[in-house]
Image (cartoon, coloured by chain):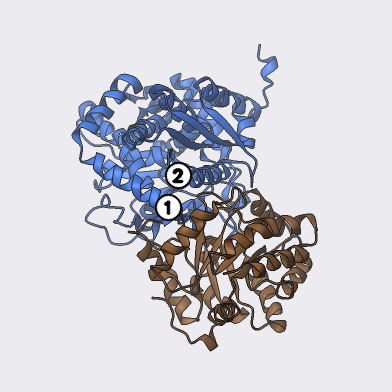
Chain colours: A blue, B brown
């Protein structure tokens, strides 16, 4: 660990860098558009009317604040730390993604954009984007890898019901990274009317900072709620990391609290040692993809490799640049959780708490299950329940060897 | 800062000087290293100067070519499947240089393979292999400073791209890093898709000429000898990529196609 900094919340710098990470590595055609987004975003951050409008939608449409729930039976079962769940799964559309979509759609409207494009992996970001587009009557095009379309069919249908056009991506490995490539290709060809609504804290500056800012509502609420319920700050925070937006939203407001231990959970798939995983920080090295420098899964020759995770939302070979920087500074610990561990946690929390978590969130729960028994009973841990698991029921059934046709 | 070189020491400058003397625009051809297989690609590369290519862009395949259309995407996949590596691409160029020491060759691709190889090491290895410069599609002027030191040290030009979206306020930043020639992307879009309006291209080239003395190459969407000829009337060089890569993919006499393009460019009056 390097020497502690005065603040961990100052980034990115004016060029969009978090240490060596971040930046704006895009084709020249897109640069002016990205600068336009940056200027527009800077303008709204100092506009109280924007904040008021956003807060109104977050309260009355998304259903915020989301509860901070004391998971009594999980806590008793594990016999250590007191576990709280931040219930982002109770948001409208079923995950944290809508927080950033709501902020970005209001921004796109102010910019006068009439067409919204987005990429999606599990379909959660696609559904959230299609939802806010329906709300404001904007044209919506969602890029989704053909492989993901097949394993997330219910979300594809939801997007279509919401009026979005879902474009199957067959290039490359036909998953999330390729969907992002095609979204960028679309943007380059439709520079006048289109806004690219990126779903995570990655991509070219200003997206990592902007998406983080919109997701920080998670951590800000958590802070207020834990002070109200426990009279003090938590001792630890745990959240899963794909691109890293739910984790960044929870972590960021606590980064300058030195007594709060912060743990990010990467998807280790079959295990980092097998090479079939999505743990960019544990198993990758710095590289440049999708507009930013980040930890990246790649070959010795700099070709991006496919990620593997049972959770489509974590199935991405990179991770947001601010997480990369927080890893290198040592402020946040990043640990891997395998598919098998996540599946076990998925079942445990479903049975003990009556909460079916998203497979993404189950990774965070699995880490809590590892940590909690080793910690004292007065240790307060907040786990981000980033999404609900309805979308994953078929995947889990398959993984457990259950034939859905014979469930009855 | 752009590198300062004498024309004698720089193949790109020498080539544009010769083209000026001939009173015509140059033909720049793009091909993907290792596509459709290493031996065929080498044969095509070696045959390009005789077929009429004045400058060669040699594509370095990348798994995630975000600015390219389907044609070049699948070309990269074919090359990678055949085991093409950055090292292999530079070896291909070295073999070309055993036979041709005059035709400028510019490496074109994306930043990650270069970043992975190491910027300093890439500059040294590319220069040693006989490259004259590089076009790095996802490296706008904002991020270019991390390359300019090593590129200058090894005498490589960083060829910068400008686009229809690059406005007057932004252009000086692009030009500050530009060496060799300036590449004007004539459409807002990816490679191998739509074609630009002739009059708009001519107007854009004139606008660029008022800001720079660098030769101006125009590319994206130029698919036929006729289109190449039309662009050659306005620009200093015409870039043809996807249309040639298509011919390579189909095994449809790519060098004959280059000869037809060259004829078109040479016939265009300036």
Residue A101 shows in the view = yes
Image x and y of residue B131, in percent: 59, 76
Front position in the image: B84 or A67: B84
Name the residue rendered at 51%, 54% in the picture: B199
Q: What crowding class fits label 1: few (fewer than 14 Cα within 10 Å), some (14-19), or many (20 or more)? A: many
- Chain of the residue on which disc 1 is drawn: B
* In contact (CB < 8 Å): disc 2 and disc 1: yes
Residue A375 shows in the view = no
- As drawn, B19 above or below A102: below
Q: Secondary structure at mark 1?
A: loop
Front position in the image: A255 or A106: A106
- As drawn, B191 above or below A237: below
**Tags 2 and 1 both on a single chain:** no
Q: Quadrant of the N terminus of chain A?
A: bottom left
Point out which mark residue B165 bears.
Answer: 1
Quadrant in the rendering for residue B30: bottom right
Q: Secondary structure at mark 2?
A: loop
Say which residue label 2 marks. A191
Name the residue rendered at 47%, 85% in the picture: B5
Image x and y of residue A29, in percent: 46, 53
Front position in the image: B128 or B199: B199
């Amino acid at each position: 660990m390097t020497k502690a900094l005065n603040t961990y919340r100052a980034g990115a710098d004016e060029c969009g860098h978090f240490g060596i990470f971040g930046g704006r590595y895009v084709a020249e055609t897109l640069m002016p558009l990205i600068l336009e987004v940056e200027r527009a975003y800077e303008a709204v951050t100092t506009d109280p009317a924007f904040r008021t409008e956003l807060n109104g939608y977050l309260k009355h449409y998304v259903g915020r604040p989301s509860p901070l729930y004391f998971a009594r039976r999980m806590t008793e079962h594990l016999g250590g730390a007191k576990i709280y769940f931040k219930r982002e799964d109770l948001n409208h559309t079923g995950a944290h993604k809508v927080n950033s979509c709501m902020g970005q759609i209001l921004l796109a409207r102010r910019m006068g954009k009439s067409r919204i494009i987005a990429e999606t992996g599990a379909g959660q970001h696609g559904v959230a984007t299609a939802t806010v587009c329906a709300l404001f009557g904007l044209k919506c095009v969602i890029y989704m890898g053909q492989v993901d379309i097949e394993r997330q069919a219910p979300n594809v249908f939801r997007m279509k019901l919401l009026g979005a056009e879902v474009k199957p991506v067959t290039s490359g490995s036909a998953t999330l990274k390729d969907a992002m490539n095609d979204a960028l290709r679309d943007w380059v060809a439709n520079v006048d009317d289109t806004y690219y609504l990126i779903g995570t804290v990655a991509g070219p500056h200003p997206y990592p900072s902007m998406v983080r800012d919109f997701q920080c509502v998670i951590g800000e609420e958590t802070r207020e709620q834990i002070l109200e319920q426990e009279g003090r700050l938590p001792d630890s925070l745990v959240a899963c990391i794909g691109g890293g937006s739910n984790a960044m939203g929870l972590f960021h407001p606590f980064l300058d609290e030195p007594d709060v231990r912060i743990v990010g959970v990467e998807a280790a798939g079959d295990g980092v040692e097998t090479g079939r995983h999505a743990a960019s920080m544990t198993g990758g090295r710095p590289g440049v993809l999708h507009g930013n420098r980040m930890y990246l899964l790649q070959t010795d020759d700099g070709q991006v490799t496919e990620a593997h995770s049972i959770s489509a939302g974590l199935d991405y070979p990179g991770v947001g640049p601010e997480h990369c920087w927080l890893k290198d500074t040592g402020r946040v610990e990043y640990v891997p959780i395998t598919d098998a561990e996540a599946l076990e946690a998925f079942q445990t929390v479903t049975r003990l708490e009556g909460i079916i978590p998203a497979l993404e969130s189950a990774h965070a729960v699995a880490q809590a299950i590892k940590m909690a028994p080793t910690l004292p009973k007065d240790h307060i841990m907040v786990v981000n329940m980033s999404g609900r698991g309805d979308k994953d029921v078929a995947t889990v059934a398959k993984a457990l060897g259950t034939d859905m046709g014979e469930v009855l | 800062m752009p590198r300062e070189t004498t024309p004698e020491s720089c193949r790109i400058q020498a080539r544009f000087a010769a083209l000026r003397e001939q009173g015509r625009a140059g033909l720049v051809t793009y091909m993907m290293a290792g596509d459709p297989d290493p031996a065929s690609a080498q044969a095509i590369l070696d045959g390009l100067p005789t077929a009429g290519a004045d400058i060669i862009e040699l594509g370095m395949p990348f798994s995630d070519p975000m600015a390219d259309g389907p044609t070049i995407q699948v070309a990269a996949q074919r090359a990678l499947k055949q085991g093409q590596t950055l090292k292999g691409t530079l070896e291909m160029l070295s073999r070309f240089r055993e036979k041709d020491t005059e035709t400028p060759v510019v490496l074109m691709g994306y930043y990650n393979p270069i970043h992975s190889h190491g910027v300093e090491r890439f500059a040294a290895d590319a220069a040693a292999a006989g490259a004259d410069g590089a076009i790095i599609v996802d490296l706008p002027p904002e991020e270019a400073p991390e390359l300019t030191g090593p590129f200058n040290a090894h005498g490589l030009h960083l060829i910068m791209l400008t686009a229809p979206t690059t406005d007057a306020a932004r252009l000086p930043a692009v030009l500050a890093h530009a060496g060799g020639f300036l590449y004007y992307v004539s459409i807002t879009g990816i490679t191998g898709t739509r074609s630009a309006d002739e009059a708009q291209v001519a107007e854009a080239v004139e606008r660029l000429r008022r800001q720079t003395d660098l030769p101006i190459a125009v590319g994206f969407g130029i698919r036929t000898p006729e289109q190449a000829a039309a662009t050659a009337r306005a620009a200093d060089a015409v870039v043809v990529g996807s249309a040639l890569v298509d011919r390579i993919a189909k095994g449809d006499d790519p060098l004959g196609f280059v000869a037809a393009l060259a004829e078109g460019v040479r016939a265009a009056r300036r």
